[in-house]
Image (cartoon, rainbow, N blue to C red):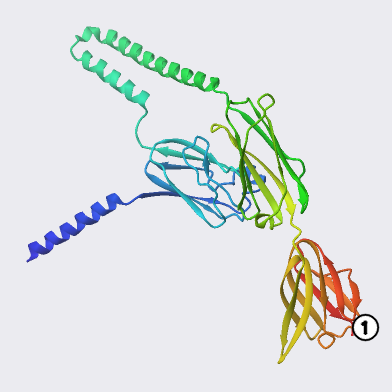
Amino acid sequence: MKAIKLNNRLLITLVFALSLSTLPVFGAEIKIPLGASKQICENTDSCYLPSTINVRAGEIVTWTNNDSAAHTVTSTKDSFDSSIISSGKSFVFKFQESGKFEYLCILHPWARGIIIVDDGQSSSSDHAENIETKKTIAKSQDVPAENTQEIEAKKQVIKSQIETDTTEAKFKKQAILDRIKIPSLILKTDNTEYEDGDKITIMGKVFPIIKKKSVTLQLLNPEGDLVLAQQITPNKKSGIFSLKLEPGGDLWEESGTYSIAAQYHKYNYPAVASFDYISESEPTSDIFYLNIDSQTFEIPYEIEGGIIQDMSLDQETPSLDISFEALHDGIITIDIPQNLLDYEYGFVIMIDSSEAVFTDLDNGKLEIPFEDGSNEINIISLK
């Protein structure tokens, strides 16, 4: 009976060991920190954390986007590409081969990192040298002792020849790389800021011109959504290309920074440009229902350039406090009921704790302009 139990334990141990051998090997985790979309991270080498890591072949590397902007993890030699990584999302890649893998974000090309994958084996040149040396030593065992000095000299000749061959191979490889013309790419817009109704011109230039190669453009809105993907053929002689856009539609509703990425030929780093766009959304008219004790007050309002989030009454002050999100410079028109907030002696308006200019249209109907970034309005009764 004891023998059976022992065999069972041995079997369980073997099964567990085999299951471990089939599990993937996890490597490192890399963070894309908050602010990586700003070029300042390049100065502190903190666009990826860490920017350089060492892993073993077969290990998995995970990139997690902790930034508020979208990013990519794209190999400079087409080894891997994450596509768009939205905020809070991750990208995983398993490195099967050893080598040095450089990568960058095509939306923010100053964000760059390096993965060094080690297979734990010696280089081919070292292997060749070891084989030749072993051959020489094997031959020396059959030679009389008086020829030892001659054998040592031959060993040095063989070693020097191996080093020479390796150096020549490196020079030949570099010469081939030098003959490959890697094109440069310039990308820009005709302005840095646009408003609703403005036309946007994207322009650029490639050099040298590669026959039958097009420039691929991708335009992303502030949320990282793809607004446009298009290929443009540069001018055959000048290499200049351009594209005119007329903003409109659901993907242009967001105000903020739009990013353009351009790619020309697979060996070239992408070029990136950006611009600020202010979407002039239609004014929103609605009624806010404010419940105080057992009474409900109807507060009609119209807002352009923002979104009303909440309203509350501070009975001690007294004041009507409005929480809202300003998408850009805008204006709110609000009709305050007399039985909610007495307007007989007028009001003082505060926006984010600063006194603001407003217009009293008639009997508690106020017109209040606000600036981009504002988030609170306090309408204070002077009674």
Q: Look at 84% across and 79% down and name the residue there.
A: 380
The residue most toward the right is 345
Query: Dot 1: within a 10 Å radius of its alpha carbon, few (fewer than 14), some, or many (20 or more) residues?
Result: few
What is the x, y in percent for residue 205? 68, 31
What is the x, y in percent for residue 72? 55, 46
Left or right, 107 with respect to 343, comes to: left
Q: Look at 55% across and 49% down and name the residue there.
A: 84
Q: Quadrant of residue 232?
A: top right
Q: Look at 59% across and 54% down and name the residue there.
A: 67
Left or right, 136 with respect to 233, comes to: left
Foreground residue among 298 and 269? 298
Left or right, 9 with respect to 55, comes to: left
Question: Can residue 60 be seen by looking at this rendering?
Answer: yes
Q: Is residue 204 above or below residue 165?
A: below
What is the x, y in percent for residue 35? 63, 52
Point out the image quarter for the C terminus: bottom right
- How many dots with numbers? 1
The amino acid on which the numbered mark 1 sits, given as a three-letter code, is Tyr
Foreground residue among 220 and 115? 220
Foreground residue among 317 and 139? 317
Q: Is residue 129 above or below residue 12?
A: above
Question: Can residue 44 be seen by looking at this rendering?
Answer: no
Q: Quadrant of residue 281?
A: bottom right
Foreground residue among 152 and 291? 291
Q: Secondary structure at mark 1?
A: loop
**Residue at the disc numbered 1:** 345
The residue most toward the bottom is 294
What is the x, y in percent for residue 47? 59, 46
Point out the image quarter for the N terminus: bottom left
